[in-house]
Image: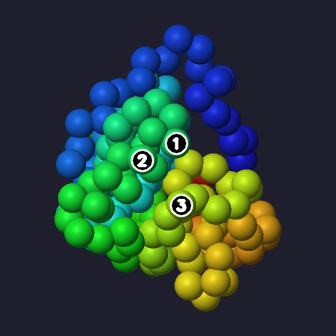
Amino acid sequence: MTLGALDDHPGLSEPEETGTTFAANARLKALHYAGATGELTVAEDSGLEIDALNGEPGVRSARFNGESYADKFAAIRRMLAERGTDTSTARFVCALALARAGGILWETAGIVEGRLQLPPSGGAGFGYDPIFHYPPYGRTLAEVTPEEKAAVSHRGQAFRRLRRYLATPPAAALW
């Protein structure tokens, strides 16, 4: 079995993420790259859903209100204030799709539930981690160790499920 990355395919175009759900975008990317490379392909889409903001930023997490995360955090704080609150339940979601040219072979998702915590806290992690408080740890994901985060992260959950799937017959024959 040989694993590759998009870097192994220079000049490969990126698909436009037009899906309205994380799962739709994961499928779109997996099918695009599987078709372009002819290889078994894994793709994921992930982001933050905030209940008080009707699921925003959701599938637009990376493109949400500004370039910097400081801008994104300020926009979230402003939007929450407009709704008369300064916090909300929230979750990180990762949808993952496995494809071959022409079809999706398998899908899964990982979810980690928590609450918003503003102002941001912690210097580890990336993205929205400094405003995502994970109650079992009593800290934001930017305040936990890499090992603690890996144990509960939405991407970690999804990729551990993928590993188990690929290790079991008949999926093991895909390789």
Q: How is the image coloured?
A: rainbow
Depth check: give the residue in front, 7 or 49: 49
Instruction: State how far apart marks 1 and 2 are (Cα).
Output: 6 Å
Res 121 seen here:
yes
Dot 3 surroundings within 10 Å: few (below 14), some, or many (20 or more)? few
Indicate which disc, 1 or 3, sits on the residue closer to the N terminus: 1
Q: Secondary structure at mark 3?
A: loop
Dot 1 surroundings within 10 Å: few (below 14), some, or many (20 or more)? some
The residue that mark 3 highlights is: 119
Toward which corner of the image does residue 163 lie, by quadrant? bottom right
Q: What is the three-letter code of the residue carrying label 1?
A: Ala
Depth check: give the residue in front, 73 or 24: 73
Do labels 2 and 3 touch, CB within 8 Å?
Answer: no
Indicate which disc, 2 or 3, sits on the residue closer to the N terminus: 2
Q: Secondary structure at mark 1?
A: helix
The residue that mark 2 highlights is: 74
| Residue shown at the point (47%, 46%) measured from the top left | 43
Where residue 16 sits: x, y (%)?
31, 28
Where residue 3 sits: x, y (%)?
69, 42
Instruction: State how far apart marks 1 and 3 are (Cα).
Output: 10 Å
Q: What is the three-letter code of the residue carrying label 2?
A: Ala
Which residue in the rendered view is the most extreme toward the bottom? 136
Q: Secondary structure at mark 2?
A: helix
Residue 70 image label: 1
Res 169 seen here:
no
Q: What is the three-letter code of the residue carrying label 3?
A: Pro
Instruction: State how far apart marks 2 and 3 are (Cα).
Output: 9 Å
Where residue 11 sits: x, y (%)?
53, 11
